[in-house]
Structures are given as C-alpha cells and as structure tokens.
Amino acid sequence: MAENRTTAQDTLDPREAAKRQREKLLILGVTVLVVLTTYFEVRLSNLSNRLPFVNSIFFFGLINFNVILLMVLVGLVFRNIGKLFLERRRKILGSRLKAKLVIAFLSFTIIPTVILFLISSLYINASFDKWFSLKVQNTLQATLDITQTYYKNMNRIAQHMASQFSGELREKYGQDKFRPRALKSYVQHNVELPTVDGIEVYTDPLDERVVASTHVENGATVTDPESALPRLPLDVLTKAFAGETVSLVQHMAGSDLIRAVAPIMDRRSGKVYGAVAVTFIIPVSIVNKVDEISSVFQDYRDVNPLKYPMKSTYFIILIMMTLLIIFVSIWIGIYIARELTVPLERLVQATQRIRGGNLDFEVINPGNDEIATLTGSFNDMTAELKRHRVELEATNRALAEKRAYVEAILNNVAGGVISVESNGTIATVNASAAKLLGQASEQLVDRNIAEVFDAATSPLPALFADSVKRAEQGLMTPLRRQFAHGGSQGADSGEEASSELMATATPFGGGIVFVIDDMSNISKAQREAAWREVARRIAHEIKNPLTPIKLSAQRLQKKFASHHSAEAAIFRECTDTIIKNVDELKDMVNEFSEFARFPSANPSPQKLNEALREVVVLYEEAHRSVNFIFQPESRLPLVDVDRDQLKRVVINLLDNAVAALQNGVGSKLPPPKIIKVRTHFNELLRIAAIEIEDNGPGMTDTVRSRLFEPYFSTKTNGTGLGLAIVKRIISDHQGFIRVTSAPGEGTKFTIELPVNLPVNLSDKEFSDVTGKEGSWPELYS
C-alpha cells in the first residue's frame, strides 16, 4: 500500500503549487514585457525625427501598455505586502519570519533606489526642456519659410518671362506668320539665355509644340532642340488658350520644374492663337535640401505633441524599475522564509488534507531533527487511519450489496412492498407496488406519504399514522386493511382493483413497511364460485316442475284436438306457447347446469386449423351476408385440446361476432361485414394463438371489463353464460383469452394455448404421442 501513496513534498496542495507556478510565470512575463516596451519606446524616441505622425498612435499605445504593466507591478507589490500582513494578522505559521526578512531586504534596496529615481528624474526633465525648446522650433520654421519663398519667387519670374516672350512673339510673328518652322529659330535663340531653362510654343492645345531646352553636360551648358521636357497637361493648355496665365510645379527625375504658360492673342481681335511656356529647372541638390528641411520640420511638428507622453514614458520606466526592485526584494525575502518554514507548512497542509478525507499521501522530510521525528509519527498515524477507512469502506460495500440483493428480491415478488421512514418519507417502492398503485416508482420515492396519497381516497396515510403510534407504544403486530383502487388491472380493464394492505413497524423506530397483496383475481374466483352455486340451485329447483307442465299442456292439446271452434284455436295457441316457453326454460336450465357442473376436458393432440375450418365452413353457408376470412398458420403443430369444447368456444365467439354485425348497429355498418379467423404459432414461447376479429361497432371499456362475468349480457334474450363458459374452457386448457375493442373499431378475441408437444419427433415418438401411424410433418396443418 505504501507504493501507491503520494508524497506531500511535491503534491501536498496542487492548487497552491499551481498558484505559485502562475505567479512565477506572471513575474517573468511582466519583466520581459517591461524590457521589450522600454526598448521600443527608447527606439521610437530616437527615430522620432524620421517617423510620420501616424506612428504616434503606436507610441501612445506603448505608453498605455506601459501604464498597464506599471499597474500590474504595483498590484503584485501590494498583493505580496498585503498577503504578508494578512498572514501575520491571522498568525499563520512562518508569517513573522517572512515579515522580518522582507523588511530587511527592503531596507537594503529602497533608499538607493529612491536616490537613483530622483537623479534620473531631474536629468530627464532637463533633457526634454532642451530638446523641445521654442528656439529650436522657430529656427526650423524660418528655414522652411525661406525655401517656400524661393519657390514663390521662381514662380513669379517664370510668369513674367512667359508674359514677356508672349509680347515679343505677338509683335514679331503675327497670326499669319505663326508657323512652327518660323518659331523654331526664335525658341532656340532665346533658350540660350542664362535665366531660362526651357521654352515651348504651342499653336493649339492638341497640336505639336516647338520646344527647346538647355541642360548641363560635362560642366558646360548644352542646348537641346529636341527637349525631353514633359508636355504640359491638357487642362493647363486649355486655360492658357482661354486667355489665362497659368503656373505649376512638376517633378521630373528628382528635379522640380517651375513652369509658367502665357497666351498669345491678336491685339485687334483679342483671339488667342498660341501659347508660350517658360520652364526653370530646380537642381536635384536644392530639391533634396528643400525636402529635407520640410521633412525635419514636419517630424518636429509630429513629435512635439509627444513631449509630455515621452517624458511620462521615461518616468514610467523609472517607476517600473523601482517597483521591480522592490518586488524582487519582497519576493526574495518571502522565498527564503518559505524555504525555512516549509517542513512545518507541509505538516499543516497534511492535516488539512486529512480533514478533507485524503489519506493516500506521505509527508517527506529529509532531515534528522525533531521535525523529522514528528513527520514520521504523523505518517504512521495517517497509515493507521487509512487502514481503518479501508475496513469501513469494505463493510459499507457489503451492506450496499446486501441492500441491492434485498431490492432485487422485492422487485421480483408478486406482492407490493413500500418502506416508509419514521418521518413519513417514502424510501423504497418495488415494481409490484408501483404497478398496483398505478404510479411510477420515481414519483413516489423521497416524497412524503401525505403528499403522494390523499387521505380521503387512500388508507396509506392513516394506516401509517396508526402504525407509528402503535410502535411508540411498543405494539409491533401488523395492521391490515382492505381497499379498492384503480391500480394495474383497473387501469387496463376499467374495473377497480381490490387489494389487502398490511403495515408492519420495524424495530428501533426504523419506519413502517407496507405489504400490498392484489386480491382482484381471488375476488373474481369467489364471485364465480358463488355464481356456480346459484346456478346449481336454480337448475335443481326449476328443472323438476318443467316436465309435468309440458306434459300437461300436451295432454290438453291431445284431448281437445278434435274441436274446431274459435275457442279451440285460442286454446291450441296458448298450449303451444306454454310448451315453447317450457322448452326455452329447459335450455336455460341446461346452461345453468353446464356452468355449474361443467364436464372436465378430455384433451388429445388435435389439428387446430382443421377444427377451425370445419366451424368456419358451417358459418359461411349459414350467413352469406358476412365475409368470413380464414388465415391458418402453415406451420402450426398439434395442440392438446378437447376438440368438442374448442369448437364450442369458436362457435360462441362467432355467434357473438355475427350478432354484433347484424343486430348491433348493422344498418350503419359499411357493406362488407367481415369476420377474420387467424392462427399463429410463437415457437419461442411455444404458444398457439387463435384470433377472431370483426369490424362491428365494438364495445365500451365498461362492457369489456365485465364481458366474462356470469349472467352479464348485452343481448335482450341472452343468459350471460356463453363467454363465462368460454373462459372456463380456455382456463381448463391452461390457456388465456383476452379481448381488444373500442367503440367504432370492431372487436378482436385472442386465445392463447400452450404447445406442450415437442417440436421435433421421430416417427416412433409421433406414433406414441398421437396413437396414429405417420411422421412428424403430419403434425402441421
């Protein structure tokens, strides 16, 4: 058993171990995040002059994240401090030693940490005031204004030169002389001027242009008649030909082109018949300087709002470092104290596990001091407790098995058994009791008997109260009650079930046990026996006077047969009526006699299909308005029955079926009136079944429940003994008969007879059983 025991050294408290592991991972994660965010913030602050403004969003995000980390660190510091003081206040073992060690470590670290924090704060303030001063901002703004003024002046010069060239072209070349070939020499001559880098003349916004430009090649200015200057945009040319002077700045191969276009119009008509464009090329070096100045100023403007967030970030970093040092100091103090107090903590936690019911462990202490001795004694005590618990569990299992065995017996006994605790709570209900009471066991168990059963309709609550009072008085004899209820039989047949209830108190106040016996079948048997006795006496008292009455009536008829007067006819009619009614009384008396002293059955192996076919053929001839359908089972074996009695059963059932079709509500039945006779064989249960079914009007539940009672009949001239005799015959053959019917759905009688003959017989065995020569296949119809 020792090898299955866990040790308290590693698994004493899994929740505490997991909690400590989470704390370590949290500390490590926060430290790594602090280092990474600090690195990124310092990196962003160094690159702030080259980052666009949109990156400030990321910067602010890092600041917010640093604030969250700061809050986490503050929470961890205060959590450990609070935990330490809470442990001390609760006088937890080792809390005083932990507090002393933490205070000692804090004393060594908090003073130099605070001094370092103050010096660093002063340095950060001075640096930020210098970097973000007003003097630096004004200098950058003035530099940017100079570059913008330079571009504006070049734009005005370009417009002026374009207007000047427009006037010269108008004076020198009128509208009639304004041809590209004539203009080419003028353009090439004027482009050589030192102030112009390119001249273009347009005769139409969509036509070819006359262009010339200069560029520097090997340190010398070279005129390029086939200039690579880009053509002016169509919208600009459209405005120029509309009479406007337009200027624009274009970018080409790293340089900026300052271009202006002026219209050439006729003085007299005012019609624009051309346009001249002047281009100044800003060198790449100047463009780069201008871009750099603009970029530096824009970066400064983007970074300037981040002055205080960046300063706050550095302060947050300092605070985090300070708190991290304090936290590490507290954690080291707690860790050392924990290492010193761990043996005692293991014993304390072990006692808590014992209180929780866990005995499958062992406290490990590698030392050899007094605490190790205490730990050894503690382990011995735990092992002894575990041994006693195992013995107790074995005893409980044995009791549970015994209880399950008793419950299995109770669930398979025919009588109902209900056990009720002394406070009225129902403890157990077997299947028979639930069936007799017509309720599911789940609806009864763990409920109070007064809630489940109504005292006005059920004797159980009153009988329980009486039994409890008798038990308190020391009277342990059982109490008995007879009661009627709509139990299993009543639910199925519409008839109330009759049961006997016995209540017995268990010793030592354990409760009351109810035993319910179903008396319905016994009551029916008693009523049937009483009816048989009545029938016997009626037959005896009535049969003797009938014969003299009939003989006297016949003698009177014979004596006055020669008279032919009207009185003689009336006399004849009256004596015929007396004779006829005497015969009917004799038939009734004979039925009473048969019911009272029914002859015992004389069974022998018979072919059911053959016997049934004989009866069905007779009825087909006698009742041609009814469609008889006979469906025999082809593999039906021989059955031990009294052939004459079986035919009488079938005749009685067919008479009832025909009467139901013709006399019940025959006028409302659909034309074909059908009676089906079927046979079946259940080889597994070894039962031969006969079904007689009609499509007549059916019957109600009340009629169906009393169908087999003696002297109960729905016919006006019936004796009510036919179906009682049928049931008697089937019972004598160890069989069962049941009826299924509902109003408007017809009626079906099912007869089940046991097949006691073996399924497979040799020829000799067949001859011994049947007394006939033949083979086994002849057993089947």
Image (cartoon, rainbow, N blue to C red):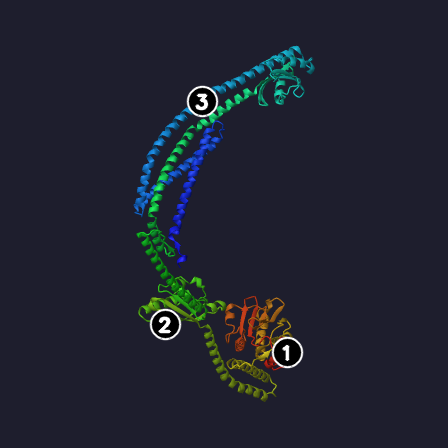
Residue 275 in sight here? no
Numbered disc in front, either 1 or 3: 3
**In-image side of 38 versus 282 (left or right):** left
Quadrant for the C terminus in the image: bottom right
Mark positioned earlier in the residue sequence (2 or 1):
2
Mark 1 neighbour class, 10 Å CA radius: few under 14, some 14 to 19, many 20 or more: some
Q: Quadrant of residue 3?
A: bottom left
Quadrant of residue 31 in the image? top left
**Relative to 84, 568 lies left or right:** right
- Residue at image mark 1: 775
Which label lies toward us, 2 or 3?
3
Residue 372 to residue 548: above or below: above
Residue at (42% x, 22% y) in the render: 134
Alpha carbon separation for disc pair 2 and 3: 111 Å
Q: Earlier in the sequence, mark 1 or mark 3?
A: 3
The quadrant of the picture occupied by the N terminus is: bottom left
User: Where's residue 173, x and y in %?
Assistant: 67, 12
| Residue occupied by mark 3 | 137
620 relative to 569, above or below: above
Task: Name which residue type carries label 2.
Answer: Pro
Mark 2 and 1 residues: CB-CB less than 8 Å, in contact? no
One can see residue 58 in this view: yes
| Residues tagged 2 and 3 counted as in contact (Cβ below 8 A) | no
Give the residue number, with chain letter if any, for mark 2: 478
